[in-house]
């Protein structure tokens, strides 16, 4: 990867980092608990807080990924898959410059994430079923 490409990625990541940090600061105002005598208002405020917490959680995760990508640029390993040490495709980096995985490793990780307890629950049920 050329210095110009790395500079372009660094700038894009720094801009994204600034956006996420600003969103995090401005999004916390919704978390304030408002009291209201009306039950429907309390329910509505609760739902808004739940949505805000979800958005803050997603932003925090993305911010960690962006900061990790900036660290990889500084370490000289940006664009190399953390799973298999192969180069990440330029198209993937252009779409998601914060990614640390090539598409093959990411698909494998996503497949495992969709079935976190499949083998574990079957073995626990089988063991518990064997007890008198």
Image (cartoon, helix red, strand yellow):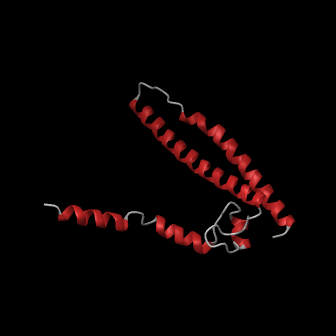
| Residue 56 higher or lower than 62, as above or below | above
| Residue located at (41% from left, 28% from top) | 38
> Is 58 situated left or right of 10 in this image?
left
| Residue 9 higher or lower than 106, as above or below | above
Q: Nearer the viewer, residue 40 or 32?
A: 32
Asked which quadrant contains residue 12, the reply is bottom right
Q: Position of residue 97 (x, y in %)?
A: 71, 62
Outermost residue, right side: 4
Q: In which quarter of the image is the N terminus?
A: bottom right
Q: Which of 65 and 91 is in front in this view?
A: 65
Asked which quadrant contains residue 31, the reply is top right
| Residue located at (45% from left, 26% from top) | 36
Q: In which quarter of the image is the C terminus?
A: bottom left
Q: Where is residue 59 in the image (x, y as percent from the top left)?
A: 61, 49
Q: Nearer the viewer, residue 55 or 90?
A: 90
Q: Where is residue 32 in the image (x, y as percent from the top left)?
A: 54, 31
| Residue located at (72% from left, 52% from top) | 16
> Is 49 situated left or right of 43 in this image?
right
């Amino acid at each position: 990867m050329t210095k110009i490409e790395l500079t372009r990625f660094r700038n894009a990541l720094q801009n994204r980092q600034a956006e996420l940090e600003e969103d995090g600061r401005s999004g916390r105002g919704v978390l304030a608990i408002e009291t209201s005598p009306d039950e429907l208002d309390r329910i509505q405020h609760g739902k808004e807080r739940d949505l805000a917490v979800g958005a803050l959680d997603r932003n925090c995760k993305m911010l960690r990924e962006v900061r990790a990508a900036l660290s990889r640029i500084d370490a000289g390993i940006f664009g190399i898959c953390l799973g298999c040490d192969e180069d990440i495709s330029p198209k993937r980096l252009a779409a998601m410059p914060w990614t640390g995985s090539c598409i093959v490793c990411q698909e494998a990780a996503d497949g495992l994430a969709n079935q976190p307890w499949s083998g574990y629950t079957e073995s626990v049920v089988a063991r518990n079923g064997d007890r008198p």
